[in-house]
Amino acid sequence: MGTILIATDFSEASGNATQYGVQLANALNAKVNLVSAYKQVPIPISDSVVIDTPESMRVLVQHQLESVAAFLSGEAKVPIGTICEEGLASSAILAAAKKTNADYILIGMKTAGKGIRKVFGNTITKLIRKTAIPLIVVPEEAKYTMPQAIALACDIMPDANIHLLDTFRILVERFHAKLHIVRVIKDDNRESSQVRVLPINLEKSMKGLDTLYEYPADKNVSHALAEFTSIHRIDMLAMMPHKHMLLERLLLKSNTQSMIFETHIPLLILPDLRNRLFHI
């Protein structure tokens, strides 16, 4: 099944994500490409400052990537390639994804500093805004297990372009996983009847799968999803962010952004391709 692009900055979170990604690639018989970004930075030497060249930085990062690939080769049953891209991490990852025609981008999420990144954003939130490729976010503490139970957080608009659910369906079928389609009811009186009517295009996309429809009630969507995935031992949670214009993004809270900072299991983000400006 194509290619998984794994982004790394050589941190512990990235190390965990690369091991998860390789195991996932083994199960999907997918090629792996490791990508890391580099940029020109000042390096202090004695009392002076020497500006390292982009080429020397590229060589250094390439060497680190090759070391990681060599370490992983013992457990990998699929080819592992390496890619260096100059520039900011999010731009470099997207450039590599386009270059390699990746089917998934996979990235690790650090535990430390989550509070600060909730306010100021990070590489992952930038990727959500711009990616046209499914993105898998792997929390630092998450270990690979074959996805036997997968949940899809259903807040999909009737006019959404959901062709990426075909990719999601293939993933569910490949692992013969139980699928939970979860729609959180935030207001019992107003939403309880309306929320149970799922978009026709979604029902068609998931037809024939081993599916359960769940309707937990909670005013806090991310809290409801976190609790649901824990109680039902979900191995992977999928979400599709809505498109929103800039003013709405500034004023509205995003359930997707909340989940990338709160989830303890891998989060699969399926981009809505109608617009690259997502509500994050």
Image (tube, grey):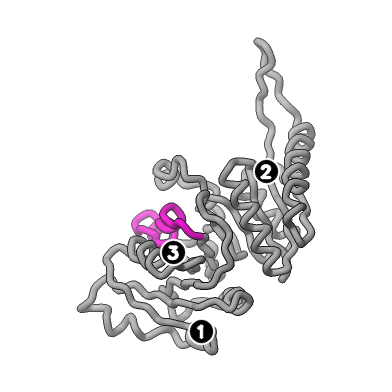
Q: Is residue 181 magenta?
A: no
**Residue placed at 53% from the left, 85% from the top?**
209
Q: Nearer the viewer, residue 280 or 262?
A: 262
Q: Residues within 10 Å of mark 1 (few under 14, many from 20)?
A: few
Residue 144: image tag: none
Q: Is label 1 or label 3 in front?
A: 1
Q: How far apart in space, not on screen, are marks 1 and 3 (Cα)?
A: 32 Å
Q: Is residue 28 left or right of residue 73?
A: left
- Residue 180, x across and y down, in percent: 45, 76
**Residue placed at 52% from the left, 55% from the top?**
142
Q: Which residue is mark 2?
A: 37
Q: Is label 3 or label 2 in front?
A: 2
Q: How far apart in space, not on screen, are marks 3 and 2 (Cα)?
A: 29 Å
175, above or below 221, in the image: below
| Prevailing secondary structure class for the magenta stretch in the rendered image | helix
Marked residue nearer the N-terminal end (1 or 3): 1
Helix, strand or loop at label 2? It is strand
**Residue placed at 47% from the left, 47% from the top?**
121
Q: Is residue 85 left or right of residue 151?
A: right
Q: Is label 2 or label 1 in front?
A: 1
Q: Residues within 10 Å of mark 2 (few under 14, many from 20)?
A: many
**Residue placed at 44% from the left, 67% from the top?**
233
Q: Is the Cβ of the residue at disc 1 closer than 8 Å to that at disc 3?
A: no
Marked residue nearer the N-terminal end (3 or 2): 2
- Name the image quarter holding the N terminus: bottom right
The residue at the far left in this view is: 189
Q: Residues within 10 Å of mark 3 (few under 14, many from 20)?
A: some
In the picture, residue 104 is in which quadrant? bottom right
Q: Which residue is mark 1?
A: 210
Q: Nearer the viewer, residue 116 or 158?
A: 116
